[in-house]
Structures are given as structure tokens and as C-alpha cells.
Amino acid sequence: MNVVNKNLEVRIYPSKVDRNDKGEKIASLDSILSNIGISRFIFNKELAFINNFRRLLVENGYEDKVIVNNSSCNCILKMLKNDYSFMEKAESSSRQQSQRDLITAFKRYHNPNLKSNYPRFKKKKDNKGSFRIINNNNNIRIQKDKYGYDKIKLAKLGLVKFKTSKKYKELLHKATDKNDQTAKINHITIKKENNKYYAVFNIECIHTPHKIIGPKQQIGIDIGCGKLAVLSNKQEIPNLDLTKETEKIIHYQKIMSHTRKNSNRYQKAKKLYQKWMKKLVNKRNDYYNKITSYIVQNSSFIAVQNENIIAWKKNKHLSHNLQLNAPRTFMDKIEYKCKWNNIPFIKVPKKFPSTQICSNCKKQNTNIKGIQNIRIRTWKCQKCNTIHDRDINASINILNEGLKIAGTTMQ
């Protein structure tokens, strides 16, 4: 059993009024939009302050070195509270979380391994936004209103209606119960996407790995474009058929490009475009969750090559498939599920020539090197005369290299 953090997203329905007929305080649309706006305001104001300070340092001949941390951001937040009284309307922990998001953005920017861009200002016209509330003294919970219906209790905002499955509702009740030590709510993020509102619970709970009857395998996975992945046991995972969703998305994008912005036709096409985009993402996530769960539950060791997806996207013949199928999402799901189930997971370095090495005699064939030779799907080893399928050979080499890195041997 492992203690893991799970994110659970549910749809919420804010009310237009502040109180119901029984006099209970309920989370209104205005209060949620106000909290989203204040969170965006704090982020933008603190970022503007840091940008101005950096500019002054450069103008006066000093080195441009600004450390963005909790203590420096707290000073800016105190000044903002004194200058803008409306900030008191927001829940207290959500104000702190907004500046933590800014600190995280700067840490990612300064990390050379992530290659993140410099933090940008948040825009109101993007039609999305969020704020996060920390659970202190059970101020985020599931409770029944005076009519007997389950509602989410949000600190300072009140009750809000939500919808989810029975399975997840049971998990939320378990996380709310103070006597139950198997689950608890860490925080909740309220977000707005395409004029719909969602609550994302971060729940710390105990995860019990599934027991699988039968032998588990050591697996090497080769991520591809034409196929989602090829396993070292010669199993091929095809890409999901997203033709219908893609056609609809392109159709509504064309309508939006041929109409005046913010006109009625434009808004109608935009709404349908967002609907089909959400369908595509949900369908892909469902497929990846099922596939990755099957792979992880039937494996004792997994090795994946840390492919340079960014370089692949620069190729005009590969970029469309990569954006549509999102192989990085597939890899990330395998990684966290391996962590949950105590299964060794190794990322083989991206420079390892997995497709060029013969898995039989280890002779390297440089004739199939590079994206220009990606059409070569089978090749013959000049040393041992073995005919290789490019993807299967790569997955076997990835497995062998992963085992070598881990210091283990083949079963």
C-alpha cells in the first residue's frame, strides 16, 4: 500500500444568488468570479513589480539578479493589501497560493532542464482562470444542505452544487470524514474553462496495487508517431482514431476564421469548437488511462526512452500526429502509475541509439540514423544477418539499456 496524491475533477454549478430559501450561504457566480479575478490581480501586480525592479537594476548599472521567494513576495502582498481593500473579499489562503504560483513559474524558468518561458501576465479575455483554497480545519468538505442534498462546502464562499459518479462521491465522503485516516483533502482548485466551472480536489489517500494472476514481464517501450507505442514483447499499441473530432474542430476553426470576431456566428462556432476539443481530450485521456493501467499491472519493470518530442515537432510531417496523440502524456501516465504500484521505471537517455543497434549482436547500423531515414521500417544486420523490425528492435534495446542502468538482469 502506498500513500499517493490523486486529483479528482468534478463539475460544479454556482448559483446566481448568495443564499437559498432556507437562509444558507451558497457560492454565487459573482463570488467565484471575484476570487478568480483577485487571484489574477495578485499574480499580475507582483509580476509587474518584479519586472520594474529588474528594469531599475539594469538602468542603474547593477546585475540583473532578483531572487523571487516567499519572503520577497509576502512584502509585495502586504503592500497590495494596504492599497486595495477589495482583496479582503478573497479567501485568505487563495491569496497566498496565487503568489506561490508565481514563485513556481520563476523556479521553472531558472531551471535549465525544463526550458520554461519567462512568466507572462494572465489575461481576463482568455475566458479561463482559477484559484486554490487550502484545507484548514476541515473548511473544505462534503456536507448536506437543509434540503438533504450533498454539496461542496467552500471556505468563505459557502455551499455549491456538484456532479460526479458514485465511486468518486464515496471517496469524497471518506476524505471529509475526520475519523477516517485513509483519505484527506489537501486543497481544492476552482477553475473556469469555456464558461463552465470545475472543482479539482487534491486528495491524499492509500492506493492498493491490483493483484494480477499470472507472470509479470519486463517491458521496454518505444514511443512512435505512426503507432502510439511498441512493446518489447512485440505488442503494438495503435494510435486512437480521432478523425471525427479532428474534422469537427477544423470545420469550426474555419467558420471562426471567416466571421467577424465576437459576432453571434463567431461565438456559436467557438462554443462548438470548445465542445469538440474537450471531447477529443477526454476520449484520449480515457484511452491512455486504460492502456497504461493494463501495461503497468502486467509488468515488473518498465523502461522508456526519454524521446526529444520538441525536436520531432519541428518536422512538418510528424508535428500534426504528435500534437493530436500527445505521446508525452502517455509517458507521464505510465511514470506516475509505476510510482503508485512500486514498479521500477527507468528513462533511457534520449541520445541512446535504440533504433540503430542490433538487439542480437549489438552491432550499430548508422545507415538508418536521423529523421530523414525514418521511412526505413525494416533492416538487415550486416554482422549476424538478422532482419529487424525497426520499432520492435528499438523497444528490446530500450529494455536492455534500462536494465543496465537499473543494475538488474533479464528474467
Image (cartoon, helix red, strand yellow):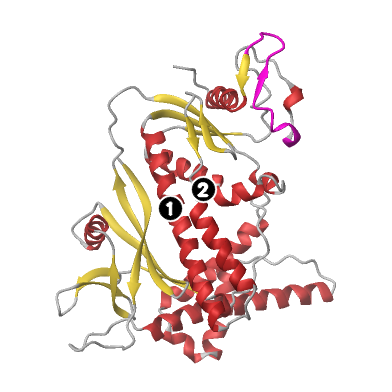
- The residue nearer to you, when weighing 92 against 71, is 92
> Could you tell which of marks 1 and 2 lies nearer the N-terminus?
1
Name the dominant secondary structure of the magenta segment: loop
Which residue appears at 27% of the width and 26% of the height? 213
Range of residues picked out in magenta:
371-386
- The residue nearer to you, when weighing 276 against 39, is 276
Residue 384, horizontal then vertical, whole percent: 66, 8
The quarter of the picture where residue 58 lies is bottom right
Residue 275, horizontal then vertical, whole percent: 46, 66
Mark 1 is surrounded, within 10 Å at the Cα level, by few (under 14), some (14 to 19) or many (20 or more) other residues, namely some
SS for callout 1: helix
Residue 400, horizontal then vertical, whole percent: 55, 22
Which residue appears at 37% of the width and 25% of the height? 216
Which residue appears at 59% of the width and 37% of the height? 224
SS for callout 2: helix
Q: Could you tell me if residue 77 is visible in this image?
A: no
> Which residue is identified by label 1?
283
| Residue 240 appears left or right of 60 | left
Q: Measured along the vertical axis of the image, is residue 347 above or below residue 57? A: above
> Which residue is identified by label 2?
329
Type of amino acid under label 1: Lys
Type of amino acid under label 2: Thr
Q: Which mark is residue 344?
A: none
- The residue nearer to you, when weighing 323 against 47, is 323
Mark 2 is surrounded, within 10 Å at the Cα level, by few (under 14), some (14 to 19) or many (20 or more) other residues, namely few
Residue 181, horizontal then vertical, whole percent: 23, 54
| Residue 47 appears left or right of 39 | right
Which residue appears at 51% of the width and 48% of the height? 329
Q: Nearer the viewer, mark 1 or mark 2?
A: 1
